[in-house]
């Protein structure tokens, strides 16, 4: 039970991050530096394990429980706690005091018409972009997730599941590797512990890995295999079109057992039907640095890469230096991002409307 006395050990732990429970949860200097000595007496840090309507489950030193997720005086989209967040809660009342600044944040326009910002996960170290060696594999979709990772400043790893079902899985590996220089690509049978084990090296003590991808690609299967349990429900894909059944409905952290590799956290997420781009211009430039480098060579800075004289894009496509399909994917993403980012800015400027805040 909470005490009303200040807890010197917990205060030390916040200031010096010396406490193993917090370190295992991913606590570190980036977060402890945001907490004043005074605040550390009245508040304790907890990490968000899962998000439910209006509430979050949290875990901290000596406290696991569920608390209301409303933040006093804040109503912007990014002011709501999401899975992976570090919160300060009042030691006595257990109420949410504030969300600590994040090392990284994944977000997207929510599916549907109003395009409000939906938060996916915070304080993530590595993003597993999960796709399967079958009809789900789609370079344009992988690029969208790569942009999301680039924008958030998080290392991406493409995880190709269902290697066992494909007669030639190496083709998928090669195609994925070609998308970004130095991109890590892992090929696994997600049901097989020996095969999946190579992924635990991304998930050492206190590290957080988020798994994203379409429904049915095997995100929850991987989490079950890596955690050595079958606690998350999984379901076979539909027979007619191979699509998943949207089995997972909550975003939730799962603990990996300790050891040389492991001891970190896997964030399982519901399969995404679509991934729209908004406010990701930096991520687009990073993932498509080859394309942007060419566009900088065009004679006119406002070149539309059509039939203007001196268009470096047209020249590079003519010589085979630039893949027209990749150029078209870049153009589509950049245009979509510009349109959605403009709409988001307009929404934010309207008083009284909750919108994403930077
Ligand atoms: N053969 C084979 N089957 C797999 C593999 N990974 C997952 N599956 C199967 O694929 C189906 C879907 O797996 P899930 O783990 O539920 O997929 P998910 O990505 O979590 O799907 P959502 O929760 O709907 O987003 C299940 O029947 C799994 O057993 C794999 O590597 N090989
Ligand atoms: Mg799932
Ligand atoms: Zn041009």
Image (tube, rainbow, N blue to C red):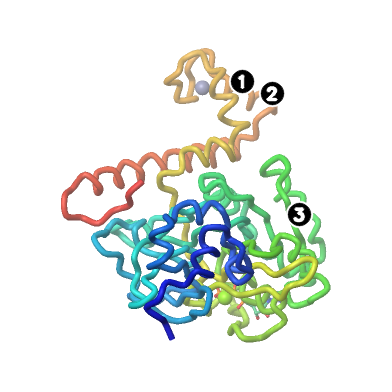
Q: Position of residue 46 (x, y in %)?
A: 47, 69
Of mark 3 and mark 1, the one earlier in the sequence is 3
Residue at position x 49%, y 38% from top? Answer: 282
Q: Is residue 17 above or below residue 197?
A: above
Please tell me which residue is depicted at 51% across the width and 45% down the height of the picture. Answer: 151
Q: Is 126 rendered above or below residue 270?
A: above
Q: Which mark is residue 315?
A: 1
Image x and y of residue 275, in percent: 47, 56
What residue is disc 3 on? 173
Per the model, the C-alpha gap separating discs 3 and 2 is 26 Å
Whether residue 306 sits left or right of residue 95 in the image: it is right
User: Crowdedness of circle 2 by 10 Å Cα count: few (<14), some, many (20+)?
Assistant: few
The residue shown at (40%, 76%) is 5
Q: Say left or right for 117 vs 218.
A: left
User: What is the quadrant of residue 196 in the picture?
Assistant: bottom right
Q: Are marks 3 and 2 in contact (CB under 8 Å)?
A: no
**Residue pointed to by mark 2:** 319
Q: Is mark 2 within 8 Å of ligand 3?
A: no
Residue 54 point in image, percent of width and height: 33, 75
């Amino acid at each position: 039970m909470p005490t009303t006395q200040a807890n010197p050990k917990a205060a030390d732990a916040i200031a010096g991050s010396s406490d193993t429970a917090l370190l295992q949860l991913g606590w570190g200097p980036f977060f402890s530096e945001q907490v004043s000595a005074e605040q550390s007496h009245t508040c304790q840090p907890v990490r968000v394990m899962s998000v439910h309507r209006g509430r979050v489950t949290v875990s901290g030193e000596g406290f696991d429980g569920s608390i209301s997720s409303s933040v006093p005086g804040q109503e912007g989209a990014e002011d709501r706690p999401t899975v992976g967040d570090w919160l300060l809660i009042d030691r006595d009342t257990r109420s949410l005091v504030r969300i600590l600044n994040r090392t990284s944040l994944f977000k997207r326009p929510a599916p549907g018409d109003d395009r409000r910002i939906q938060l996916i996960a915070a304080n993530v170290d590595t993003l597993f972009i999960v796709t399967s060696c079958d009809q789900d594999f789609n370079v344009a979709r992988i690029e969208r997730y790569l942009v999301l990772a680039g924008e958030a400043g998080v290392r991406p790893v493409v995880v190709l599941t269902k290697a066992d079902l494909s007669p030639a899985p190496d083709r998928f590996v090669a195609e994925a590797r070609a998308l970004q220089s130095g991109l890590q690509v892992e090929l696994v049978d997600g049901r097989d512990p020996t095969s999946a084990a190579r992924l635990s090296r991304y998930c050492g003590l206190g590290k957080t890995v988020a798994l994203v991808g379409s429904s049915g690609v095997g995100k929850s299967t991987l989490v079950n295999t890596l955690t050595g349990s079958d606690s998350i429900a999984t379901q076979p894909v539909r027979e007619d079109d191979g699509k998943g059944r949207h089995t997972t409905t909550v975003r939730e952290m799962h603990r990996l057992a300790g050891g040389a590799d492991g001891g970190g956290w896997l964030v399982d997420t519901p399969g995404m039907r679509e991934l729209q781009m908004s406010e990701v211009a930096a991520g687009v430039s990073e993932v498509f640095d080859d394309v942007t480098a060419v566009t900088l060579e065009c004679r006119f800075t406002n070149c539309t890469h059509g039939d203007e004289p001196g268009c470096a894009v047209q020249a590079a496509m003519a010589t085979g230096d630039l893949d027209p399909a990749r150029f078209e994917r870049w153009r589509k993403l950049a245009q979509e991002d510009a349109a959605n980012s403009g709409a988001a800015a307009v929404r934010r400027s309207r008083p009284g409307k909750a919108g994403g805040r930077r």
